[in-house]
Every structure is written in C-alpha cells, then in structure tokens.
Amino acid sequence: MAAVPAIAIRDIRKKYASGFEALAGIDLDVAPGEIFALLGPNGAGKTTLISIICGIVTASSGSVSANGYDTIRDYRMARKQIGLVPQELNIDSFETVWNTTCFSRGLFGKSPDPVYIEQLLRDLSLWEKRDNKLITLSGGMKRRVMIAKALSHQPRILFLDEPTAGVDVELRRDMWRMVRKLQSTGVTIILTTHYIEEAEEMADRIGVINNGRIILVEDKSKLMQKLGKTQLLLKIQHPLSILPAELSAWDLTLSDDGTELTYTYDSQADGTGIPTLIRELDSIGVEVRGLQTKQSSLEDIFVNLVRSSS
Ligand SMILES: Nc1ncnc2c1ncn2[C@@H]1O[C@H](COP(=O)(O)OP(=O)(O)OP(=O)(O)O)[C@@H](O)[C@H]1O
C-alpha cells in the first residue's frame, strides 16, 4: 500500500469576502520526507494555500489532510503535525527566547522537554540569547525565534513561507543546513520562495502556482531536463552587422557587438542541428572561432512558464 501523503490537498478553492477568487481548485500530494518548493509570482495564492493547510484561513470548498488527519474534522491532530514559519514576524514581546519557545510547545499539548529545546536553540544559534527578551533582538534573530517556535512541538511537516526573504547570507545558510537535517529525520518540508536558486538548491520537487492554479508539478531534475533549453554560443571571427538572411530559419540571435551568435535548441530532440548550422555558416563565409554551451536555469524555465500561463 502506498504511504499516506504528508499533505493531501483536494480541489481547494478560496473566494475571499471581496469576491476575489484566490484559489481556483488546487490538487496536490506531498510525500513524507519530501522537500517541496512552491513557486509563484506575487499574489499567486501561495500564502492563502499555506494558511488553509494550517487552519488560519478557511477554504470555500475542498479538503486537506496532514499525515491523514483532516484539517477541519481532526483540526487538533492535524495542527500538531505541522510547524509553520510565517512570512511576517509577529513576536514583539517582552518574553524571553526560552520562555516563548517552551510556551509554544505547550500550546500543542506536548510535555516540557528542556533537552530538546536546548538543542533546538543551539542549532539555531539562539542558545546565547535564551534569556534575552524578544523585543531586544535583531530582525534576523527574531526570524530564528520564529523557526524555534515552529519546531518547538517536533512537527513532522514544516512550512516555510518565504523563509529567506530579507535575511543575511549566514542565516540563509543556517536555514538550508537545518532543512537538510530535518529532512534526514523524515520531516516533510514545504517552502515558498521567490529565490529560484533556493528551490534549485533545496527542493526534490517543484510546484508552480499562478492565478490560483497549479500549472505544473515536477521532479526538479526532470523539470530541468524537460523544459531546459540548451544554448550554443558561437564566437565569430569577423563581427557581423546584421544576422544574415540565409540564417533566418534558425533560432539565432546576434549579440549587440556582432561577435557572438546564440543558438537555442531543444537538447531532448533527436537532432540538435549543430553540424548543419556550422556547415551553413561556413558556406556563407561566417568564420567560427569558438563554441560554448549553456544550460538554461530554473529561473529561465519559471519565467517562461508563468508568462505562457498568464
Ligand atoms: N483577506 C483577503 N481578502 C481579499 N483578498 C485577499 C486576502 N488575502 C489575500 N488576498 C488576495 O489573494 C491573492 C493571493 O494572495 P496570497 O497572499 O495568497 O499570494 P502569494 O502567492 O502568497 O503572494 P506573495 O508572493 O506576494 O506573498 C492576492 O491577489 C491577494 O491580494
């Protein structure tokens, strides 16, 4: 029997009171232990979807379960499974780091575990600050506390909504390290991000959401393979002022200074056409002095996808 998905989303729709339809029927399964990155432009519906899964926003219709617990019918059990690091910092309090983290654990009905909390604060470089009041911490430190709170009850599923927006390099690196460590203990991680390189670096699978619809879900490496175009850069011996008319059938662009031709081709196709192109260039007297290939990045793929679905 297949394992119960960590998250199972069925036909989730959300129309806000304003009449705006933020989600127009979302179906998605995330497997246990997976790192899933949800990408989408501003206003695509990412936060709305996460808020529905975490029980902060009510869906207009559809259902969600977390480790098999329905997020409405079995709200308490479902919520226990989940840790959420929200986008907004909401912890300007006079409490200490230690108390806030322990209190957060208590809210989920978990008995105190000072050994676990100590390790958590150490992992997040917060141990030295454990007696500091939150209000005295820097923005980056507050974000670390948000993560400590989200992990205080040892959730099996962690949501990170724009975890590294506006954080420094060190925190971003710590966060990535922590995500990998959590994954190694079987925790499922779902993150939204605007940083494509973050998804490229971290995710096992990528989902792209636009205008309240999931337009693609794919294994990261397959996505790169399937949609990734390869480009061949041809350095030209004698600069060209315009692209010769004889080459109009080819997907070629000429650099502004006329010294480089870029040929874009589908690396999955049977033939790339490169030998024919080189022969044609030769026959019209365009001398090539160097070649270089370039793989399109996840960022190129993402921009093209969103553009063509809008
Ligand atoms: N309470 C609300 N009432 C009405 N519309 C809302 C409400 N909350 C969000 N929206 C709208 O729903 C859409 C989706 O918003 P959401 O915050 O889910 O997007 P997002 O993908 O997380 O965007 P971002 O990347 O900017 O955080 C937006 O157009 C937003 O203006």
Image (cartoon, rainbow, N blue to C red):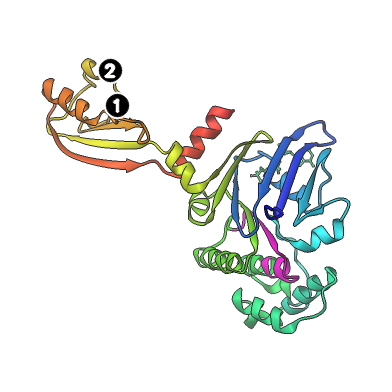
Q: Which residue is most to the right?
A: 73
The part of the chain drawn in magenta is 147-163
Q: Residue furthest front?
A: 1
Q: Nearer the viewer, residue 140 or 99?
A: 99
Q: Is residue 15 left or right of residue 198?
A: right
127 above or below 289? below
Q: Does 255 sit above or below residue 28?
A: above
Please give the residue where the numbered disc 2 appears in the rendered image. 248
Look at the numbered disc 2 and give the secondary structure of its residue.
loop
Name the residue located 69 percent from the left edge and 73 percent from the top edge. 136
Q: Residue at x 68, y 55 (%)?
A: 3
Determine whether 85 is above or below 12 in the image.
below
- In the structure shown, which secondary structural element does the residue marked by tag 1 occupy? strand
> Which label is found at residue 148?
none
Q: Tell me where residue 4 appears, x and y as whole percent.
A: 71, 54
List x then y, in percent, for residue 221: 46, 47
Q: Residue at label 1? A: 252
Q: Position of residue 47 (x, y in %)?
A: 70, 47
Quarter the C terminus occupies: top right
Q: Please tell me whether residue 149 belongs to the stretch shown in magenta.
A: yes
Callout 2 amino acid: Ser
Tags 2 and 1 in contact by the CB under 8 Å rule? Answer: no
Q: Is the residue at mark 2 in contact range of ligand 1, meaning its CB lies under 8 Å from it?
A: no
**Which residue is at a point 78% across and 78% down the rendered structure image?**
99
Q: Indicate yes or no whether the magenta region holds residue 30.
A: no
**Residue 61 position (above or below residue 282):** below
